[in-house]
Structure formats: structure tokens, C-alpha cells
């Protein structure tokens, strides 16, 4: 009997030890800065639910319980995000390294998604778009955003391209439909999310036959949160590998095609 009792105690001890081994880690508070009101499908404010939605939200939700994360979304702007991280008032934001004013001092995750930007117009393109061959045409852009490939054309003395800033991609699309700019520049995911809105049901949009720029989007993390990098990279790999990323993009962008978008 003593031997049996001893074995039972050992078994119970191993069960309790295993339970302690899988206990949740301490809560990790994360403040995520957003270029308000965001950009669908990546991260945007949804008026119906009065909350932020998008690929980034889906990504964190896929492992927040397991890693014991609590993510708070902070309204900000592209211009302020870097300063907020340097000041320790935010922990991370989504960006391409090429868009940063000063990439030094930040930590970068593995790429989450490829940001392929095109030009969009209300008439068909004759062929590939070459910025240097333009002649004073206007491009709807988003305020505070950098467009490295178009920058030379924006800044040259001939004014090959003229930049017209807007506060959001939806306003860019609206200005395009009203003829206030000749083109709008967006990523394909942005365009599929924005240009299929019901307010644009009567419009046709055409995509340039060539990609204007291609940039890897990463999570930019402040140096003081180094411990988050391996966690984020681990779960990001699974999020992509398991098809959760592609399903999230479709859910927030729709499955429309250019030039004619069928409204939901």
C-alpha cells in the first residue's frame, strides 16, 4: 500500500508541475500607434463596431490569449509615430523601413505583408506608367506619407508630377472621382478595400499595368521592448503559414477585381 500511495503522490506531483509549466506568462501591455483613421485592410476604424479592425487586429487576436497580450490602439499619425516610440509613449506601429525618417534605434519584425503600390485612374492606362514621362499630372496622395519612387518627379523643377494630399484613402478616391486629381496611389489591398465602397458603385477604376513600388510592411518596435520580437516573429510565421493572413486580407478587402468593382 505504501508503494501504491507513493506512486500516486508522484503522479499528482507531476500533474501539478506540468500545470505550472503551461501557466500563462505575465501580461504584456502593448500600445500600438495608428495613422488615424487607419488604412484598410491593414488597420482601420470600423464605424459600425466603433473599434479598430483589420489584419493587424486579427494577427494579435490569433495569439493574444496564449501569450497573454493586451493591445491598446492609439490614434496617431505617420509623422508622430516615430516620436511616440522614442518617447516610450507607444510600443510599435506598422510601416515599411523605407518610410521612416530615422530607422536607427528601432527593432523590426519579419515582414508581415508585401505592400505593392499602383496608380489608379478613372480611365484606362495606355501602357506602363513612367513617372519621368509625365507632364504636370496630379496624384492624390495621403498626407504625411512618403512615396520614394515618385519623390523625384514630385520635387523636380519641371513639376513632372504634382502631389495633392488628402487625410485618408477614401478622400483620395473621392477626389479622383471628382476630377481633382488624375491619379491616386494606393497599395492593391488598400484599393480593393476603399474603391469597392458603396459610395463608388457608379465609378470604374483602372489599375496601372505596372507596380509603382513594392515595400515589405513590418512591425516597428521601440528598443525598450526587445522581448516582444521573438514572440511576434514566432506567431507571425504561423499566421502566414496557416493561411490566416490571406483569409484576413480577403475578409477586410473583399474579392473584387479591376476595372469594374461589384459593390457588396
Image: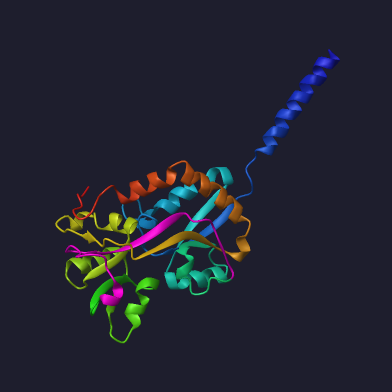
In percent of width and height, residue 25 lies at 64, 46
Location of residue 10 by image quarter: top right
| Along the viewing direction, whichever of 164 and 205 lies nearer the viewer | 205
Quadrant in which residue 228 is drawn: bottom right
Q: Residue furthest bottom?
A: 157
Q: Which residue is at the front of the view, 103 or 14?
A: 103
Can residue 33 be seen by looking at this rendering? no
Name the spot of residue 5 as percent of width and height, x first: 81, 18
In this image, 63 relative to 227: left or right? left
Residue at (69% x, 33% y) in the render: 18
Q: Residue at x 16, y 59 (%)?
A: 203
Q: Which portion, as a residue range, is magenta?
A: 105-133
Which residue extends farthest left? Answer: 202
| Image point (27%, 68%), residue name | 129
Q: In this view, does 243 lie to the left or right of 142?
A: right
Q: Does the magenta stretch include residue 225?
A: no
Between 125 and 166, the one lying in front of the other is: 125
> How many numbered badges does the structure rendering display?
0
- Does residue 241 appear to the left or right of 142 in the view shown? right
Residue 245 picture location, percent across and down:
43, 47
Q: Image height check: is 208 above or below 70?
A: below
Is 78 above or below relative to 2?
A: below
Amino acid at each position: 500500500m505504501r508503494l501504491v500511495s507513493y506512486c500516486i503522490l508522484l503522479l499528482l506531483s507531476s500533474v501539478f508541475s506540468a500545470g505550472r509549466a503551461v501557466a500563462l506568462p505575465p501580461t504584456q501591455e502593448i500600445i500600438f500607434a495608428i495613422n488615424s483613421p487607419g488604412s484598410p485592410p491593414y488597420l482601420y476604424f470600423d464605424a459600425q463596431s466603433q473599434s479598430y479592425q483589420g489584419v493587424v487586429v486579427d494577427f494579435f487576436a490569433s495569439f493574444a490569449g496564449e501569450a497573454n497580450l493586451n493591445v491598446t490602439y492609439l490614434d496617431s499619425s505617420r509623422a508622430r509615430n516615430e516620436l511616440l516610440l522614442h518617447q516610450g509613449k507607444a510600443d510599435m506601429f506598422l510601416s515599411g523601413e523605407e518610410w521612416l525618417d530615422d530607422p536607427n534605434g528601432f527593432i523590426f519584425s519579419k515582414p508581415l505583408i508585401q505592400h505593392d503600390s499602383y496608380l489608379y485612374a478613372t480611365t484606362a492606362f495606355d501602357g506602363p506608367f513612367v513617372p519621368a514621362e509625365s507632364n504636370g499630372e496630379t496624384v492624390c496622395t495621403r498626407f504625411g506619407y512618403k512615396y520614394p519612387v515618385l519623390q523625384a518627379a514630385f520635387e523636380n523643377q519641371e513639376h513632372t508630377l504634382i502631389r495633392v494630399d488628402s487625410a485618408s484613402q477614401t478622400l483620395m478616391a473621392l477626389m479622383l472621382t471628382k476630377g481633382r486629381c488624375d491619379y491616386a496611389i494606393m497599395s492593391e489591398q488598400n484599393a480593393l478595400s476603399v474603391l469597392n465602397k458603396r459610395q463608388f458603385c457608379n465609378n470604374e477604376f483602372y489599375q496601372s499595368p505596372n507596380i509603382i513600388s513594392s515595400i515589405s510592411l513590418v512591425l516597428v518596435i521601440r528598443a525598450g521592448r526587445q522581448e516582444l520580437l521573438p514572440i511576434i516573429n514566432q506567431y507571425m510565421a504561423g499566421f502566414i503559414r496557416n493561411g490566416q493572413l490571406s483569409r484576413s486580407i480577403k475578409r477586410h478587402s473583399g474579392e473584387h477585381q479591376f476595372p469594374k468593382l461589384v459593390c457588396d
